[in-house]
Amino acid sequence: MSKTQYEEPNGDSKKELRFNHPSGWLYLTQHESVPVLIDALLDLPPHREFNQKEFADHAGVTRQTVANYLPLLLEVEIIEEVSNTSPTRYQLADSAVVEELFALNGALNNVEPR
């Protein structure tokens, strides 16, 4: 093990501990495709509805990728199902999580390059 990697007395590295007990941020972003999906959602017009295929096309990923991560995006209240639609349609959720994502994205976009 590298000297720069911290190890707990039980042998777990700090990184392993983080993945075993993730923060909300790590829980959301530990999956490689989730940041791409969220980036695509941040690019949608307000109240825009979409199905899995439309979401996949907009994000530039496969429908299978979207299907894999829809439950996570629903669980953390980033998207919500649109009632009485078949096939199921989705939209950005009206949630504190989405508000904070837009705030973080705006703050990051306003940082001056060095």
Image (cartoon, rainbow, N blue to C red):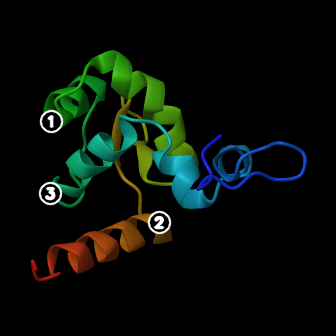
The residue wearing badge 1 is: 58
Where 92 falls versus 12 (above or below)?
A: below
Residue closest to the eye, 57 or 105: 105
Instruction: Tell me the crowding category of disc 2: few under 14, some 14 to 19, or many 20 or more residues within 10 angstroms, Cα based.
Output: some
The residue wearing badge 3 is: 45
Q: Tell me the SS state at disc 2.
A: helix
Q: Nearer the viewer's eye, disc 3 or disc 1? A: 1
Cα distance, mark 3 to mark 1? 12 Å
Please name the residue shown 23% across and 23% down the image.
53
Left or right for 32, reference 59: right
Please name the residue shown 46% across and 37% down the image.
31
Q: Is tag 1's residue or tag 2's residue first in the polypeptide sequence?
A: 1
Cα distance, mark 3 to mark 2? 17 Å
Image location (x, y in percent) of residue 71: 53, 34
Q: Which mark is residue 17?
A: none
The residue wearing badge 2 is: 97
Give the amino acid type for the residue marked by disc 2 in the picture: Val
Image location (x, y in percent) of residue 73: 47, 44
Give the amino acid type for the residue marked by disc 3 in the picture: Pro
